[in-house]
Amino acid sequence: MDKLRIRGGNPLRGHIPISGAKNASLPMLAAALLTSEPVRLSNVPRLRDVHTMLAVLQALGAEATFCGASDVAVCAQDIHTLKAPYDLVKTMRASFLVLGPLLARFQHVEVSLPGGCAIGTRPIDQHLKALEALGASIELNEGYVTANIDGRLQGAVIDLDIATVTGTQNALMAATLADGESTIVNAAREPEIQALADMLIAMGADIDGAGTDVISIKGCETLHGCTRHLMPDRIEAGTFLIAGAATQGSVHIDGGCHEWLEAPLAKLRQAGADITLDDDMIHLDMHGRRPKATDIRTATYPGVPTDLQAQFLALNCVAEGTSRVIETIFENRFMHVPELARLGADIESDGTTATVRGVKQLHGANIMATDLRASSCLVIGGLAARGETIVDRVYHLDRGYERIEAKLTAVGADIQRFNA
Ligand code: EPU
């Protein structure tokens, strides 16, 4: 099993390129199921989750492959099964994104229930509520969701109880092929929803309001192929900025995502980072200073994303002062706390609140990744610690960070992957 060996203590210094956004690529790959024509996506990151989504599309009968370093071609002309099997869905919850497109185009779909995951129970009731509002009849049988519709889905008001990201994406994709007008109320506003809507518009859909909490869709009978370039990964960018701050370094992030990082950048400024923006670059400089403790409360966009909570918590571990980190999106997203404690961090967690008393120095230790973002926070802990840290189960990291060791090595980190 792959592990990472980190010899910490080097401040990160230099340029870090940002890959295409994982959480934009997954719904956009699923959206290719809405048309029989070819779809081509560029700037797609080579991540385990992307390969899983390609495997799901292939299992359904679509052609879906990388055809260049970061270009993916999908053609869903010959779909030969409408069943997304447990073996694939269990490895990645986002596989559930095929539900809306398949139902809208083929009037029938069976998708395995994704089940709980490490960070919480993560129900799918809002996805089902949205499709039922569009007229689908839904049954749960032997661990599968089966959805059917006679004829086309019917435009409707979809009033979500929770502003769910992938739930909004499933509803949006389904509504593009519905008969008549739909409105998604209390829609999630994350930039990845806007990216999906822009792709659907390029395929011929009529959508207004994506990026706000009310999205209007005028359904159409068919959609056509398109070519899209993926937005940069704002969570990857945020992770490297926090790593730069935790190591008292100076990093320059290429990729043009500062417009989506306002809340995290404000927190980094509070932590003492000198941040400047120009064109597509974010420059962060700690001027060799120790970060200051900064309270964090996660929120839906445009707040501090839950996907950066663990990384901010790691930053607070080496900061001057005491901070509180409150997780409001997922009920079990503090599994990195005991691992950071192995590095010498002083954290008390109670439910969804962690109180972090910053220590001057963390010390290397053997630690274990438990989920994707927890893994990146452990890497940050290891980079900031004195001595050697071994991070186990880095397959979690490979789900969402492309070439992370290479990118960190290029800015001065001492980090190697090995197999043991
Ligand atoms: N929820 C429900 N019912 C539903 C759907 C969601 O109760 O039907 C709850 C969830 O349990 C959670 C909250 O609503 O408490 C928000 O979850 P959401 O549905 O928005 O999360 P998601 O769509 O499953 C996406 C990202 C996650 C990210 C969250 C929150 C993708 C593929 N995944 O998940 O990304 O944490 O939104 O921003 O876009 C990651 O990249 O590491 C990751 C976990």
Image (tube, rainbow, N blue to C red):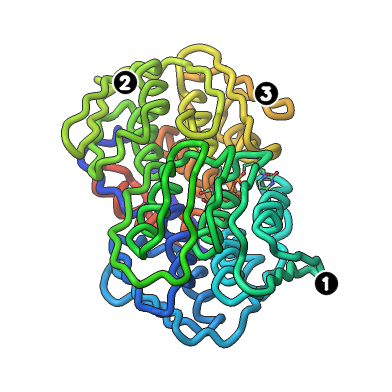
Q: Amino acid at mark 1?
A: Glu
Q: Position of residue 261 (x, y in %)?
A: 37, 32
Q: Amino acid at mark 2?
A: Ala
Q: Is residue 11 above or below residue 6?
A: above
Whole-number angstrom distance, CA of label 3 to CA of label 1: 41 Å
Residue at coordinates 66% horizontally, 45% vertically from top-left?
119
Task: Say which residue label 2 marks.
Answer: 273
The residue nearer to you, when weighing 151 against 200, is 151
Q: Which mark is residue 142?
A: 1
Residue 203, image quadrant: bottom left
Residue at coordinates 41% horizontally, 43% vertically from top-left?
191
SS of the residue under disc 2: loop
Residue lying at the far top in this picture: please name it.
321
Q: Amino acid at mark 3?
A: Glu
Asked whether, in this view, residue 120 is left or right of residue 375, the answer is: right
SS of the residue under disc 3: strand
Task: Say which residue label 3 marks.
Answer: 348
Is residue 369 visible in the rendered structure shown here? no
Asked whether, in this view, residue 284 is left or right of residue 4, the answer is: left
Asked whether, in this view, residue 204 is left or right of residue 276, the answer is: right
Which of discs 1 and 2 lies nearer the camera? The answer is 1
